[in-house]
Image (cartoon, rainbow, N blue to C red):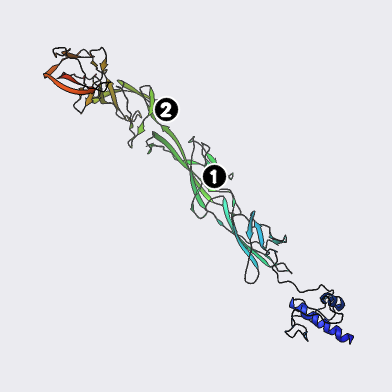
């Protein structure tokens, strides 16, 4: 009887625990569980009611389907794992390549993978690290490089594609990282001009290249490349005399070539040609108005210069070449034109003075053609003298150089004007022609006390004119 009671209690407890997701094995210590499930006031040995009981309030004859007869809890608190979500983050992996973190992506087969392009040699190893602190070192597989010419003598291009792998091991995932590497070894070949500039080479075909350098001394016998290779220079016998296309003087040029093979770089050599140029520049400078101005060179070698002055240029100018020749050229002035300035008494003079010399091939002197357009003003402003001792400017209008001014004087008690002539500051006297008789003008004004008064003004108008002549210097 006692065994039957214990069995009924066990089934009742199992059913109750199944309702909250707990399985009870046959080996569970039932006495403590039964005591924990016994309602207050119920006698011992009476089964406790389960939350999962049927409407008839009778205990279930069999354990719940969620209970496991094969489970063997070791204590009274054994339960199934909770379905509640956890706060633990998902495991992610990344690899540090070229000091850059590269995330790894899982393929459908579970392999973590990444691809990285680099312009440096492949690393000896790659470390993959997860966010839980796990790290895996992937060593470099056997490397096979492709080598080819870069088109720049002195450098060789290497390319290589490597797969860094790690097999899955327990909780460790399989990893495959692909490195596409392309890098250059060597140093671009150069040759230095006399001015210290390092000149690079231009490819002219497979393993061939050329460049041009300038040398100060046309008797230079050898040149040395940046890789230490020494090449002999062969100069042409006859120099050339050429007007510079940029208009900067005449160039005396010696040319030559130096050809040979470079040193080996990674088993690679180049056949190079260095074109040498040694030039002497002849320029001409005009000394005008206290200033030195460089002349330009035309296509035929003529030295030409156009500059402007704000006064009449000198009768002669001096030309000096960069190699010490000196020439004196007389000038001829043409096209003189006088115009007004808008200021009475001041005249603007415009003209061009040219200094020319034909070329003398026997003397090595180029043709010279210097042109100086110039503008100069002369004279002082002529003013209108006023009766109070002051003066005023006259205003120029139009292109006919007509200058006007307006002034006033007074009428005496008999309406006669106080003056009959106007005088200019240069001494010119102009009689006034008064027109008609005085005209009366009435104006009403308001007095301070608010009353009004009528004032009559008598007005007489007149004009005075003359003609002034400007003369060239």
Q: Is residue 344 left or right of residue 41?
A: left
Identify residue for label 1.
190
Res 429 visible: no
Work out whether residue 72 or residue 470 is closer to the camera in this orientation and state it: 72
Query: Could you tell me how many numbered marks the image carries?
Result: 2
Crowding near the residue tagged with mark 1, few <14, some 14–19, many ≥20 C-alpha atoms within 10 Å: some
- Judge left or right: residue 247 versus residue 71: left
Pick whichever, 296 or 48, lies toward us: 48
Precedes in sequence: disc 2 or disc 1: 1
From the top left corner, tell me how far across and down residue 257 is, in percent. 48, 43
Question: For this rendering, which residue is in front, 243 or 458?
Answer: 458
Inter-mark Cα distance, 2 to 1 = 33 Å
Residue at numbered disc 2? 323
Residue drawn at x 65%, y 61% is: 143
Horizontal arrangement in the rendering, residue 380 relative to residue 456 (left or right): right
Q: Is residue 257 above or below residue 453?
A: below
Kindly indicate the quadrant of the structure image that contains residue 364: top left
Quarter that holds the N terminus = bottom right
Q: Residue at x 17, y 19 (%)?
A: 457
Tell me the SS state at disc 2.
Answer: loop
Whether 345 is drawn above or below 151: the answer is above
* Residue 325 picture location, percent across and down: 39, 25
Q: Position of residue 153 (x, y in %)?
A: 54, 50
Residue nearest the viewer, comparing 371 with 359 = 371
Q: Which residue is pictured at 64% across the width and 72% down the height?
A: 109
Is disc 1 placed on a helix, strand or loop?
strand
Q: State which quadrant residue 323 falls in.
A: top left
């Amino acid at each position: 009887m006692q065994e039957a009671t214990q069995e009924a209690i066990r089934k009742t407890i199992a059913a109750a625990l199944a309702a909250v997701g707990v399985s009870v094995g046959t080996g569970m210590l039932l006495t403590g569980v039964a005591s924990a499930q016994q309602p207050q006031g119920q006698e011992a040995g009476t089964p406790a009611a389960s939350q999962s009981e049927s409407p008839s309030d009778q205990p279930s004859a069999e354990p719940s389907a969620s209970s496991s007869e094969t489970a063997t809890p070791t204590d009274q608190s054994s339960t199934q794992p909770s379905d509640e979500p956890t706060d633990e983050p998902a495991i992610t992996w990344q690899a540090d390549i070229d000091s850059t973190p590269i995330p790894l992506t899982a393929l459908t087969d579970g392999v973590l993978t990444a691809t990285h392009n680099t312009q440096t040699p492949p690393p000896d190893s790659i470390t993959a690290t997860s966010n839980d602190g796990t790290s895996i070192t992937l060593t470099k597989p056997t490397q096979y490089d492709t080598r080819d010419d870069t088109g720049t003598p002195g450098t060789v291009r290497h390319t290589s594609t490597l797969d860094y792998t790690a097999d899955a091991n327990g909780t460790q995932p399989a990893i495959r990282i692909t490195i596409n590497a392309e890098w250059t070894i060597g140093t671009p070949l150069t040759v230095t001009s006399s001015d210290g500039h390092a000149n690079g080479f231009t490819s002219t075909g497979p393993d061939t290249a050329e460049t041009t350098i300038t040398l100060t001394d046309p008797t230079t016998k050898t040149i040395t490349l940046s890789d230490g290779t020494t090449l002999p220079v062969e100069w042409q016998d006859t120099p050339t005399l050429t007007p510079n296309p940029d208009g900067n003087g005449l160039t005396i040029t010696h040319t030559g070539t130096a050809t040979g093979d470079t040193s080996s770089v990674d088993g690679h050599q180049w056949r190079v040609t260095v074109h040498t140029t040694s030039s002497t520049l002849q320029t001409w400078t005009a000394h005008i108005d206290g200033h030195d101005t460089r002349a330009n060179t035309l296509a035929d070698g003529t030295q030409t210069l156009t500059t402007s002055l704000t006064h009449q240029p000198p009768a002669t100018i001096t030309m000096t070449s960069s190699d010490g020749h000196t020439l004196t050229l007389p000038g001829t002035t043409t096209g003189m034109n006088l115009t007004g300035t808008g200021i009475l008494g001041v005249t603007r003079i415009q003209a061009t003075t040219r200094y020319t010399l034909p070329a003398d091939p026997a003397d090595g002197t180029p043709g010279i053609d210097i042109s100086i357009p110039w503008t100069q003003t002369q004279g002082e402003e002529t003013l209108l003298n006023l009766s109070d001792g002051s003066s005023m400017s006259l205003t120029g209008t139009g292109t006919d150089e007509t200058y006007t001014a307006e002034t006033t004087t007074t009428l005496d008690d008999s309406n006669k004007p106080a003056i009959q002539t106007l005088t200019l500051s240069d001494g010119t006297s102009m009689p006034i022609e008064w027109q008609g008789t005085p005209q009366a003008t009435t104006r009403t004004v308001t007095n301070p006390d608010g009353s009004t008064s009528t004032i009559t003004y008598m007005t007489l108008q007149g004009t005075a004119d003359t003609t002034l002549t400007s003369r060239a210097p």
